[in-house]
Image (cartoon, helix red, strand yellow):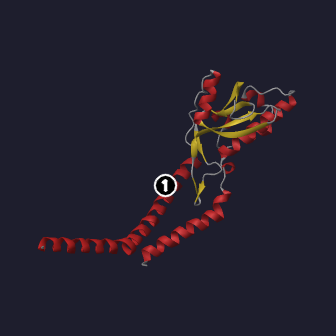
């Protein structure tokens, strides 16, 4: 085995080891987008507690929670620009229990649990984070695929929220660049190994078959 093949084997082993050591720690909560719905549902929960279970109907309703507003405004996700508070709430149907009270204005791509692969993070999407209140009055959030979101709005006979005009998230750009270079790296390693196995396991067999075919053809012509 020559050095290119050795490099490919070592490269693939390093990728697997790095995935085992690091990949498990990369989850959606590590992006500002994944943290935004948490801040939103905490604010909405606090508002409901102080107003006898009443839901906030706009960002102005939450302005009194100064510490929370400052916290979410400092997030790169810009929740007040990129999320809309639904009024009235949208029934979640069979997808989620309860109602959707807020969600991304536009479909997005983000790093979500289960999208880690060989140390680089794959982007899931298009989809949206939705903030929900269940039948017991508790708040939470979830990731929903864009098709499921559209079906809920269509079932309720309501229009989709107006899309935001914010730029692409910086972590999405980095993830796409990372994914591109890791893909090139893995394909290069696999290509080198495929070439090695072809030369050592298949090319000589092809040569034998070709030689046998030529010999039989020559014998047939002589007869």
Determine the secondary structure under disc 1: helix
10 Å neighbourhood of mark 1: few (<14), some, or many (≥20)?
A: few
Disc tally is 1
* Side of 63 relative to 160 (left or right): right
Q: Position of residue 207 (x, y in %)?
A: 29, 73
Of 7 and 199, nearer the camera is: 199
Q: Position of residue 210 (x, y in %)?
A: 26, 71
* Side of 210 relative to 176 (left or right): left
* Side of 182 relative to 221 (left or right): right
Of 73 and 189, nearer the camera is: 189
**Residue found at the far left of this picture:** 222
Residue at coordinates 57% horizontally, 36% vertically from top-left?
166
Q: Give the quadrant of the N terminus.
A: bottom left
Residue wearing tag 1: 180
- The image quarter in which residue 60 lies: top right
Is residue 31 among the parts visible in the rendering?
A: yes
Compared to residue 72, the image places residue 190 above or below, namely: below
């Amino acid at each position: 085995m020559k050095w290119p093949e050795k490099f490919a084997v070592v490269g693939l082993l390093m990728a697997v080891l790095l995935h085992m050591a690091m990949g498990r720690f990369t989850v959606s909560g590590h992006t500002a987008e994944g943290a935004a719905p948490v801040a939103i549902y905490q604010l909405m929960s606090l508002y409901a507690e102080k107003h006898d279970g009443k839901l906030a109907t706009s960002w102005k309703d939450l302005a009194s929670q100064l510490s929370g507003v400052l916290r979410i405004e400092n997030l790169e996700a810009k929740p007040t620009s990129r999320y809309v508070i639904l009024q009235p709430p949208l029934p979640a149907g069979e997808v989620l229990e309860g109602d959707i009270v807020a969600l991304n204005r536009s479909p997005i791509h983000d790093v979500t649990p289960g999208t880690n692969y060989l140390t680089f993070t794959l982007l899931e999407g298009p989809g949206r984070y939705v903030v929900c209140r269940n039948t017991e009055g508790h708040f939470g959030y979830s990731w929903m695929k864009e098709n499921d979101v559209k079906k809920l709005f269509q079932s309720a006979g309501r229009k989709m929220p107006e899309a935001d005009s914010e730029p692409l998230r910086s972590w999405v750009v980095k993830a796409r660049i990372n994914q591109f270079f890791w893909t090139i790296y893995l394909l290069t390693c696999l290509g080198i190994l495929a070439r090695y196995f072809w030369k050592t396991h298949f090319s000589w067999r092809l040569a034998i078959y070709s030689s046998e075919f030529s010999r039989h053809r020559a014998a047939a012509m002589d007869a």
